[in-house]
Amino acid sequence: MLSSGIALARRMLFEVRRDVAAARQRDPAAREASTLEIVLTWPGIHAMLAHRVAHALSDARIPLAPRLVALVARTLTAIEIHPAAQIGEGLFIDHGAGVVIGETAQIGANVTLYQGVTLGGTGFASGKRHPTVEDNVTIGSGAKLLGPIRVGHGAKIGANTVVINDVPPNTTVVGNPGHPVRVEGRRPEGPDTDWIHLPDPIAEAIEALAARIGALEEALGDAGAGTAANARNGKASGARASAHPPKPRKGRNPVGG
């Protein structure tokens, strides 16, 4: 009994150290903070500690307790993780407010989630209904991953992206619905870009249309100005002609009378 308790304490200490290392590696704000400060004030670490307890209770099929632990963790951290969710090593939840991880969600190793991320289900069917996220995936703030989809190794999901289809490995996805803008580090077409300024083909198409409309309006304006100038010139010619009317011809009227 004592040996099992010591083993459990060592395991928990190892997991806390790993969580702190993940925070220092992926959160610039944590690099100057002490280990004690990170453990006491980082909500993502609190949520993971609570989830490990709730998940162990859920695996042991203890009633009510897993849900209570998850509820307390959600109240304290604003992060909701279902006790049955399967989470790998090194998950880092940055800021964390509004993160929701569903019952049948599966998360691999070294995954990063930002605030507002939802790993949610669709419909009321039983069985696997939440996403599977493989290793080394980064999911931006506000992204919604819905249904039993699979997000491949090393993929990146842009902020506020809605993903309802599988994402291939090493692919960057943005938009609603999400569409790939990078595959294996390269854009499907055009020059590559950085992670901060993700390309958006839909926005680029709208910008191109707006530029085209502006050019057409300018062309129409030039054409209208030319028509007005011609009209003014015509009036001026008529005025000059009326200023010098033809002189009456003397002599016999050629039409008789």
Image (cartoon, rainbow, N blue to C red):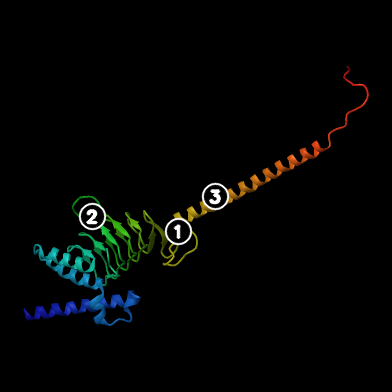
The residue type indicated by label 3 comes to: Ile
**Seen from this angle, which residue lies furthest right?**
251
**Helix, strand, or loop for circle 3?**
helix
Q: Is residue 221 left or right of residue 156?
A: right
Which of 163/50 is in front?
50
Query: Does the CB distance between marks 2 and 3 fall below 8 Å?
Result: no
Q: Residues within 10 Å of mark 2 (few under 14, many from 20)?
A: many
The answer to whether 211 is drawn above or below residue 252 in the figure is below
Q: Which mark is residue 200?
A: none
Disc 2 from disc 1: Cα separation: 30 Å
- Which corner quadrant holds the C terminus? top right
- Which corner quadrant holds the N terminus? bottom left
The residue type indicated by label 2 comes to: Arg
Residue that carries the numbered disc 3 in the rendered image? 213
Which residue is found at the position 25% from the left and 62% from the top? 100
Q: Residues within 10 Å of mark 3 (few under 14, many from 20)?
A: few
Q: Residue 129 carries which label?
A: 2
Q: Position of residue 46 (x, y in %)?
A: 21, 72
Disc 2 from disc 3: Cα separation: 45 Å
Q: Which of marks 1 and 3 is in front?
A: 3
- Which comes sooner in the sequence, label 2 or label 3? 2
- Tell me if residue 252 can be seen: yes
**Seen from this angle, which residue lies furthest left?**
1
- Which comes sooner in the sequence, label 1 or label 3? 1
The residue type indicated by label 1 comes to: Pro
What number of labels is visible?
A: 3
Query: Does the CB distance between marks 1 and 3 fall below 8 Å?
Result: no
Residue that carries the numbered disc 1 in the rendered image? 188
